[in-house]
Amino acid sequence: MYASAIKHLTLRFRRQPLVLCVALVVAACGGSVPPPVSVVPSRESQEVVADEQPTVPPEQAAQEMVSDPDDKPIIVGLLLPLSGAEQATGNALLKAATMALFDAYDPRIRLLPMDTAGDPDIAERRAQEAIYANASIVLGPLLRTNVQAAGDILGPAGVPMIGFSNDSSVAALGRFVMGFLPEAEVKRIIDYASGQGLSDIGALVPEGRYGNRIRLAFGDTAALADVTIAAIESYPPDPDALFEPVKRLASYDERRDDVRQEVRFLRSLRDDVTDEIAEKLEDAEVMEGVSFDAVLVPEGGALMRTLAPLLPFYEIDPNRVKLLGTGLWNDVGLLGEPPLQGGWFAAPDPSGPTAFLNRFEETYGMTAPRIATLAYDAVALVAKLAREPAQATDGEGVGAPSMLDRDPRFSIERLLSPEGFVGVDGLFRFLPDGTTERSLAILEVNRRGFQVVDPAPQSFPAFGYALKN
C-alpha cells in the first residue's frame, strides 16, 4: 500500500504541478528517522491518495503531529531536472523526496516540484516562480550552472537555497551546496593515510575541472599533513589513452632501464654467480619499487575498472603501494577488481545509505543513483527546522540581517548550526561559505563489501563565526 500510494503521487507529479501537504521529520544530532506514518493530503492531491493512504496506529500519528496544525502552510520549492538529459536523475531525486513525505507527519509542509530541464535560464525562471509562490526555502537545483542561476534570483529575495551540486565554486552564504565535495574526501583520506605512516604519496588525477579540484585539495592537504607529493600525473577521459599516464606515474621505462643496466653490469663481471643473478633479473625484469608508498586514484565506474589493472601491469604493486580513493569508489561494481582489494577511500558510513537505497528499490522497483539520499536528507532537514520554534534574533548573529526574514525558521543562523544535523548520509553541517562539511568514514575494499576501518566522527570540532553586514 505504501509503494502504491507513492506511485500514485509520482504519476500525479508528471501530469501537472502539485503542491503536497506532507509530513517530514529529520533526526536531531544522534537521533533517528521515524518509521512511515500517514499522510494527510492537500485539496489538490486528495482525490489521488484518499483511498490509498498508508495507515498507522492513531497513537503513532498523534505522536508525529505538530502541536499546532493550523499554522499557515510552509511552501518548499523543489527545483529538479524532470525533463532533458538529466531527467532520470531528477526524477529519482523526486522519488526520494516523495519517500520522505511519507516518513513523518506535518500537514503544514507543502512541497512544490518545479522542472528546470537542466537549463540555467529555466532554473532562473523557476526560482522566480518559487518566490511568487511564497516559498520559505528552495531545495535544488542539481547542476552547477542551474544552482548559480537560481541562487542569483533567490538570494536577493531572502530565500535560502540548498542545492544538490557538488561544486563548491557556486556555493555562497544562503546558497548552500549539499553534494559530496571531493575536496573533503581528499582531505579525509590523505589525513588518514598520513596517520597510518604513509608519507610519500603519488596521485593519478583526471583532466578537467574535477581533476583540478582534486589537485588543489591534494596539494593543500599534503602540506598540512606533512606528506610528500612523490609523483602526479593526469589522464584524459578515454580508456584507450590511459596507458601512457600510468606508465609515467610508475616511471616504468626508467625503472626497466635500470634493471637492464644492472644486468649488463653483472654480465660484465664474467662470474658464474653474477651471471646467474643477471639471468634471473633478465627473465623476471624485477624492478625497484616506485618512489611512493601510496597513490591517490579519484576515479570511479568503467574508467576505474580500466585504470585499476594498469597499475600492477606497470609495476605499481598493490601489495606494497596502498591505493587511495574518493567517494567515487563507493560502487559495488568495483568490489571484484583485484588491484583495489585492501584499498581505502573516504565516504559516509555505508549503513544508512545502503538501507535507504534498498528501501528505494523495494518501493519503486528500480535502482536509485547514489545522490538520491541528498533529496531525502534535504526535505527531512526542512521538517526538522519547521518543527522547532525559531528564536528571536538581535540581528548580530551569522547572516541575521542579510536575509529578508521571509521565514525565520529557515534563517541563515539556524541553517549554520555548529552542531550540524544527522541524515541518511550521517552527520553534516553547512558552513558560512555555502559548502557542506560531512563526517566521513574510511572504508576498505574487499570482495565481501566495503568495510569500515575508521568510523566517521560522531561530532564536529567547535568553531565560531560572526558575520555581520
Image: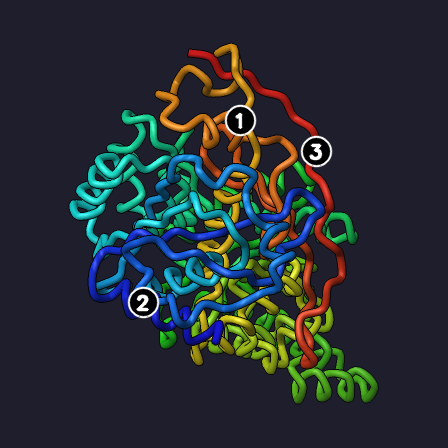
Judging by the rendered image, the residue that carries numbered circle 1 is 390
Q: Image point 55% across, 60% down: which residue?
A: 37
> What amino acid type should be assigned to the residue bearing mark 3?
Pro
Judging by the rendered image, the residue that carries numbered circle 2 is 48
- Rounded to the nearest angstrom, the CA distance separating label 3 from label 2 is 47 Å
> Sequence order check: which comes first, mark 2 or mark 1?
2
Residue 61 on image: x %, y %? 58, 56
Q: Nearer the viewer, residue 226 or 61?
A: 61
Residue 290 in view in this figure? no
Viewer-nearest of discs 3 and 2: 2
Badge 1 vs badge 3, beta-carbon distance below 8 Å: no
Residue 368 on image: x %, y %? 45, 70
Judging by the rendered image, the residue that carries numbered circle 3 is 461
Q: Nearer the viewer, residue 454 or 462?
A: 462
> Sequence order check: which comes first, mark 1 or mark 3?
1
> Mark 2 Cα within 10 Å, few/some/many (few <14, many 20+)?
some
- Element type at mark 2: helix
In the displayed structure, 348 sits above or below 12; it is above
Residue 372 on image: x %, y %? 45, 61
Q: Image point 25% across, 39% down: which residue?
A: 133
- Element type at mark 3: loop
Compared across the picture, whether 113 is left or right of 450 comes to: left
> Mark 3 Cα within 10 Å, few/some/many (few <14, many 20+)?
few
Badge 2 vs badge 1, beta-carbon distance below 8 Å: no
Compared across the picture, whether 250 is left or right of 163 comes to: right
- Element type at mark 1: loop
User: Can you tell which quarter of the image residue 227 is in?
Assistant: top right
> What amino acid type should be assigned to the residue bearing mark 1?
Ala
